[in-house]
Amino acid sequence: MNLSVQTPDLVLTAIVLVGMLQVAWLSVALFRRRVARDVIQKSIPPLFAIWVVMWPIYHDPRWIWAGIGMLACFVLLPLLLRRPFWRDLRRAWAAPPSPVDYRLKKPTPFWPLAFFVATLGIAAGLFQSIPEFGLGIALTVCLAQPAASWLDHFGFLALGFPAHPQQTLPGHLLLVLAAAGLCSWSVHVYHGIDWQPLLMATSVAGIAASVARALVPGSWNQPAAAAAMGVVLWLL
């Protein structure tokens, strides 16, 4: 089945391309100024929330996959190109030294941003059939999960999970509350329902994301959290 070509779809695809170029340039600029890699990587997902908010504008939502494909290409290009810019981008987006999967006891094989792209892909896939749920999960991926990671960085009330000992109670609470709010707002956008009464139901999805984030080893917890939210929202 051929994709229908509409101006909004092409414009939004161009926005993703320009956005990725800007993100790559900014990542290299910060890396060359010796900004920590984890700070650079945690700052990237929220930038794509601007694009995700525009998903309902797509005439043919399958065009979202063009944007996901561009994100994937930018993750792969630093591995293939050897120019100084791409070399520094590879270093800026690389995993921290000795990234250990605490359960499998071996290095995580993929870059952190590769997991972000995969997780956003799960949300995009759900968006094709149930857009109100896909939009909420995508916003959770871009906003709630990074915010929880930032809170974990302070180490206050660390929970000491075997797979993720650095995760904290405030981080998990923020994830649950933010995910519930974003998913409720997404349902409101599509159906005009007051979003506050939906918080009780969507908070169950936030709890599912929190559990997956705590129990699934390594960066695999990101796509696992998105998939858990999708299953719970579909059941509800």
Image (cartoon, grey):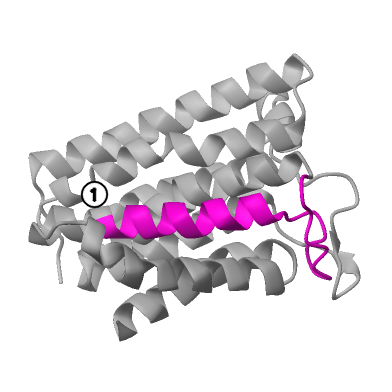
User: Start and end of the magenta stretch?
Assistant: 156-184
Q: Looking at the image, is 181 positioned above or below residue 127?
A: above
Check disc 1 and report the residue beneath it: 55
Q: Looking at the image, is 102 positioned above or below residue 39?
A: below
Name the one closer to the observer, 24 or 179: 179
Name the one closer to the observer, 73 or 165: 165
Q: Is residue 180 visible?
A: yes
Q: Is residue 68 visible?
A: no
Taking the view exactly as shown, the residue that stands out farthest to the top is: 33
Please identify the quadrant where the N terminus is shown: bottom left
Name the one closer to the observer, 143 or 194: 194
- Which residue: 23% across, 63% down? 197
Taking the view exactly as shown, the residue that stands out farthest to the bottom is: 235
Is residue 114 part of the magenta span, yes or no? no
Residue 136 image offset from top left, x and y in percent: 33, 58
Report the side of 138 relative to 209 (left or right).
Answer: left
Report the side of 139 relative to 75 (left or right).
Answer: left
Residue 232, by quadrant, is bottom left
**Mark 1 residue element:** helix
Residue 110 image offset from top left, x and y in percent: 71, 58
What residue type is disc 1 on?
Answer: Trp
Residue 190 image offset from top left, x and y in percent: 13, 58
- Which residue: 85% across, 75% down? 103
Residue 194, by quadrant, is bottom left
Is residue 179 part of the magenta span, yes or no? yes
Report the side of 53 relative to 221 (left or right).
Answer: left
The crowding category of the residue bearing disc 1, from other C-alpha atoms within 10 Å (few below 14, some 14 to 19, many at least 20), is many
Tally of marks: 1
Name the one closer to the observer, 106 or 199: 199
- Which residue: 73% across, 27% down? 88
